[in-house]
Amino acid sequence: MFKKILIANRGEIALRIIRACRELGIETVAVYSEADVQSLHVQLADGAICIGPAPGNESYLRAERIIAAAEIADVDAIHPGYGFLSEDGDFAEQCEDCKIKFIGPRSETIRQMGDKAMARETVQAAGVPTVPGSDGVVRDPDKALQVAEKIGFPVIIKAVAGGGGRGMRLAHNAMTFQKEFAAASNEAEKAFGNGDVYIEKYIEEPRHIEFQILADEHGNVIHLGERDCSIQRRHQKVVEESPSPFMTPDLRQAMGDAAVKAAKSCGYWNAGTIEFLVDKHRNFYFIEMNTRIQVEHPVTEEVTGIDLIKEQLRIASGGRLGRKQEDVKITGHAIEVRVCAENPGMNFAPSPGDISLYYPPGGHGVRVDSHIYGGYTVPKYYDSMIAKVIVVGRDREIALARMNRALNEYLIRGVFTNIGFAKAIVNDPEFARGNFTTRFIEEFMQRTPKTLFESKLH
Ligand code: ADP
């Protein structure tokens, strides 16, 4: 096992990794920007190195500074967390070249699956169903229109380098297609420095159901069941749960098998997620793979009892999976809410600032993964997510009541938050029935009085 690792991230995920390392007796080195001097990850790691000014592209996104910090601190490995450099094949390759273990898959796997069109082709070849769409990238607008007409409208135009719900455009008919096609490509060029796009059929009223997989470096692959992430605002997840209320044993078997196949198709190792859309007839289609740990990993941990960060560390240090597929048991029901410093009353605008009072929920079955505290200042430079509330109960009804109770207990003063909004979702009868698709939030916002989820600045 590693003796010392560097954590190339900040916020709650940096803390989460420190916690796993502590329990395994691994020393940790934090890196931080000038905006994060007061951060808990800096205070709690065994060592910390400043890597630059506040903006991400001058600190957490600077591969050469992180590698330099890793060399100075003489670490065995780097954990990239999620976001920032976690899916950057060049960064992983630099780690490999410097003989610093990258805690994740090989750099070539990251590149292969990070290109969404190439990922589609890779899993397709292994017999995993994908959304009907173009054969790879389409550049010529006229050809693209022909492809769209062949697939049948509506279609979705997606950036091969897309992520975080960005770089996607919906086209309802041939009239609007070319405008959307150009817009998608331009947006992708601006956001990702790569304007390549591909086309997929727009699946109507789907659920987003993803499978957590674990793979060691000796060819063993298992899945740890699914997470339902259909509750999204602008293609960004807000509430996640495991198991999915829509799941059946047969569907889990089929999708789990497909997820393992997808991981094997690219020679994957470490923790990863295979994302699928599932239509109302329970047909499922691969959409993409995330080659890293995900924000919503705790719901899987709570229903399987498996610490995913520890597994990542064990795998990266050369260990074998300690269990077979049949040893994985799903018990109970877990739900996660992403708590963000944002103002639902102002179209969810970020709300950085000083936290004047902080009291997180606790008690039986409640877990809060967060880096904030009373007196902490939420910087304006990074993602607005400040905490994750995860609850687990014997069944979904208990978990829902517990989430409602936990959110009611949560006191955060000084910044606007989406806690009221999340509470309104959790208390919504359609949500309680488990009857929802990725369009849930859009419909919910239309039928819910705004006052129900307004956030007040105390
Ligand atoms: P990103 O990498 O930006 O997260 P994804 O490909 O994972 O993008 O898609 C994000 C979300 O967008 C999905 O969870 C789903 O809600 C919606 N989506 C993506 N592809 C389709 C599709 N073909 N049909 C309908 N919705 C889609």
Image (cartoon, grey):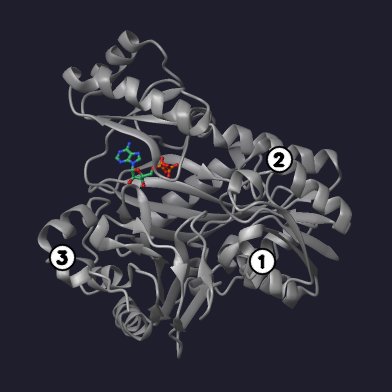
Query: Of 267 and 413, which appears nearest the observer?
Result: 413
Query: Of 390 and 302, which appears nearest the observer?
Result: 390
Query: How many callouts does the rendering have?
Result: 3
Q: Position of residue 369 (x, y in %)?
A: 52, 73
Q: Nearer the viewer, mark 3 or mark 1?
A: 1
Q: Are marks 3 and 2 in contact (CB under 8 Å)?
A: no
Q: Is residue 297 above or below residue 91?
A: below
**Ligand 1 visible in quadrant:** top left
Query: Mark 3 or 2 closer to N-term?
Result: 2
Q: Position of residue 216 (x, y in %)?
A: 70, 53
Which residue is label 1 attached to?
37
Quick check: 82 left or right of 276? right
Which residue is label 3 attached to?
450
Secondary structure under tag 1 reads loop
Which residue is label 2 attached to?
91
The label shown at residue 79 is none
